[in-house]
Amino acid sequence: MTTPLHPESGPLPPPPKKTSKWLLGILIAIGLLALLIFGSCVAGIAGLAGLAGSSPTLSTTPVEKNSGIDAETKGPAPTKASTLTRAQKEAIEAAESYLDSGHFSKKGLIEQLTSEYGEHFAKKDAVFAVEYIDADYKKEAVEAAESYLDSGHFSKSELIDQLESSYGEDFTHSQAVYAVNKVY
């Protein structure tokens, strides 16, 4: 198959992907901002009602060890002897919030947490948080595939490509194939 030529400038560029990470980042940031405002309002109402009695303190809850981190996101695995830092707690809460509002791969969630358009956490704190929450990324991939099919028309191979794409969701090949087989 030959590449079609534009009459004046040569080969045509490939068509753009269906989803933009930039747009997804903006939408997630708006959602998180709304959650933050709502949480602040609830905290303010609770404080006015006298329910916020004492000043907040940091917990030193031990961290339980989760399964290992894949090769792309190698970092220190949580251990029972470690305690959560403030940055780790915040990264965990942000990661859980992102998963509640969208469909993320492990790599995509780490990128969102460290992105200048996301939360801008240090990579070590983002990796720690993503490993700590131990999400079901196959389930996330299935939900992302369903979302794509609800908003557009995809062949099996095109949907796998979209789920794997760094411009899409950045799931692993096995997660993308699993998801497509579940939704088709």
Image (spheres, rainbow, N blue to C red):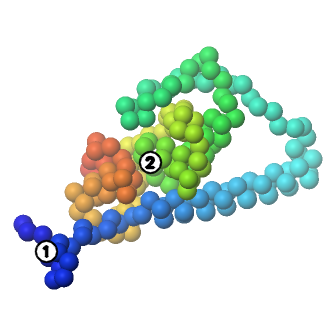
User: Image point 62% across, 16% down: which residue?
Assistant: 81
The image quadrant of residue 3 is bottom left
Q: Amino acid at mark 2?
A: Gly
Q: Percent from the top left, x then y, of residue 54?
A: 89, 37
Q: Nearer the viewer, residue 149 or 83?
A: 83
Q: Percent from the top left, x then y, of residue 109?
A: 48, 46
Q: Residues within 10 Å of mark 1 (few under 14, many from 20)?
A: few
Q: State which tag comes first along the sequence, 2 or 1.
A: 1
Report whether residue 179 is seen: no
Q: Specify the quadrant that holds the C terminus.
A: bottom left
- Left or right: 103 in relation to 12: right
Task: Give the number of the disc on residue 4.
Answer: 1
Q: Percent from the top left, x then y, of residue 181?
A: 26, 50
Secondary structure at numbered mark 1: loop
Q: Specify the quadrant that holds the N terminus.
A: bottom left
The image quadrant of residue 158 is bottom left
- Left or right: 9 in relation to 159: left
User: Image point 27% across, 65% down: which residue?
Assistant: 154
Read off the residue under disc 2.
108
Which residue of the protein is positioned furthest toward the front in this rendering?
9
Report whether residue 144 is seen: yes
Up the image or down, 85 lies above or below 163; here it is: above
